[in-house]
Amino acid sequence: MPRNGLSRRAFLGFLPVCAALSACTAQNTSLGFDADGRLQVVATTPILADVARAVGGERARVHALIPNGADPHSYEPSLRDVRDVAYARLAFTNGLLLEQRKMVAMVSSNLPQGSAQVAVAERIEQYGGKLEPVVEDASLDSIWLGLRVEGAESSGASATHSAESPSDSDASVAFSVTRVKGPGQVAAFITQTFGAVEMMCDSQARGTQESAQDGVRVRTGDMGSLELPLQAHTHLSWAFADAGVYELDVLATPRNAPEGVRQAQGTLHVVVGEDPAEAASRLGANTTVLASGHADIAAQAYTGRLVIRADSGGKVTEHDLARTIIVVPSRTLQEVPAGGQYGFLRGSSREHRGQVYLLAQAVLGKHVHGEIDPHIWHSVPNMKAAAQVMRDALAEADPPGTSLYTANTERIMRELDELDWEIRGIYASLPEASKNLITTHDGYRYLASTYGLSVAGFVTPVAGSEPSIQQRQRLQRTIRDLRVPAIFLDKNTRARSPVLREVAHENGVQVGTLYSDSLDDEAPHYADMMRANARAIQRAMGGL
């Protein structure tokens, strides 16, 4: 394998730098070529950059914006990234909401005039690639409650655009809670991969005001907000300090959105640690009670409605927000973890001091995504399609190099066919009973569907906390029922997964590590990563 491959809102703080860089670009590199005459290209992820280098060969200088080992879901661009984009003729993004919205907006805003941006994953179907829908695992003993924006035209509908044309990459909807009526604190937040917390709502945030209504505490004021791109979805953790009935007034406000996107608002009803029957009777006969599975508070962008969108077994059901009750059972009561990042959780002032009722987010880390899984690279056939997307984009940006890009891609296709044959043989060697994977990162659908595996997910508790008895029991049942010989950690975050290691030890199963979203020094190229994952699974799962 050749070592050169395979194996509209900018930040305000960046604007002065961008202006200076644009001036330099106009003077020195207006054509997007470096001093050696090479086409200047940026790619968001190391994996995309690796394949782009293989296709571009000696005619292209390719720079990865996201460094090796960084999480593309949460990485935010630096000033150096802005500079590299400002000199680029061509930018490759993954798309399908893999990258941070700030990253995509930065690329769109800082590409020179005449340069092109290509969302690779959004174009692979034109070249024989296959996309997988995101199907949430609803096998839970409490509900997952997230946020969603639906009903708008996707900003990725046109995967290629000129830097001169308008972009919707900065369009979003901001979710906030404007009023909380209930017995105690309410907090809704995202726990990042390394434990940092991003707040959507804290009813006891500084500056909120407390009053009473019908003898019940009411909090109003600025409790925080969370923005989502159009057509996106995210998981949340929800914490409630005390048992009882809560009302939350939710507001969804469009920001920099296309014409026709409307504000939406409504009231969310939550029953914590109590029987929901009485609350349901007050709301009326047609009230829906949701106590398990996956659901989202969904803002319908063009109707101005907030609804509860529940999905189970591939079936999606829409419920009237005003006539839906979310149940938070007593078994969700957990100790507030030590550490400053969770200091905002006051815990109960009543009998369960130092504890909160917690609906834990389904996926650890900030994981905003759309309806399609963006992790296309875990299928080699998809990366064959990606190489062809890049070939055509490079040829359009640099027509004199077309013959070279074509020849390089033909070689890459042969090498990828060999890689695909090799790892299919590895996965075929696994006993049928050992093709079930338990992983920490929900990013292996393409690996499973392409190579005949099955992924059994594990719901990670909030960072720094011990899992509940129910969570441990669920994982242990999965290991026992499926006879799973090993569980796999994400290579980037393996040091922060003590729970999985402990459960593995208790059940006598191995612990392996897999590459998920990035490369490193041990696997500097795409082919290295795919081989490393196949061999890690083979070793742990008992293949030949």
Image (spheres, helix red, strand yellow):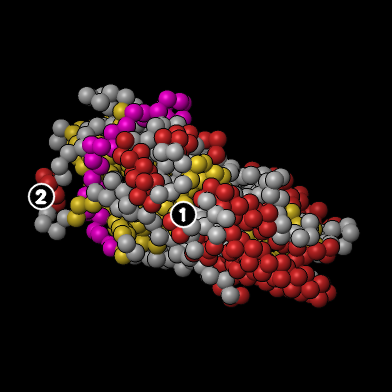
| As drawn, 124 above or below 504 | below
Foreground mark, 2 or 1, reads: 1
Q: Is residue 442 left or right of residue 513?
A: left
- Report the residue at 25% width, 59% height from top: 319
Please tell me how crowded label 1 is: few (under 14), some (14-19), or many (20+) other residues with Cα within 10 Å: many
- Report the residue at 21% width, 42% height from top: 271
Tell me whether the residue at label 2 lies in contact with that at label 1, contact meaning CB atoms closer than 8 angstroms: no
The residue that mark 2 highlights is 281
The residue that mark 1 highlights is 434
Per the rendered image, the range of residues in magenta is 317-345
- Disc nearer the start of the sequence (2/1): 2
Please tell me how crowded label 2 is: few (under 14), some (14-19), or many (20+) other residues with Cα within 10 Å: few
Of the 4 image quadrants, the one containing the C terminus is bottom right
Determine which quarter of the picture holds residue 345: top left
Q: Position of residue 410 (x, y in %)?
A: 74, 73
Q: Position of residue 408 (x, y in %)?
A: 77, 70
Q: Residue furthest right?
A: 36
In the image, 130 versus 447, the foreground residue is 447
Q: In this view of the protein, can residue 203 be seen by the observer?
A: no
Distance from disc 2 to disc 1, alpha carbons, whole Å, reads 49 Å
Q: Position of residue 221 (x, y in %)?
A: 35, 38
Q: In this view of the protein, can residue 398 be seen by the observer?
A: yes
Q: Secondary structure at mark 2?
A: helix
Q: Position of residue 314 (x, y in %)?
A: 34, 64
Q: Is residue 346 left or right of residue 68?
A: left
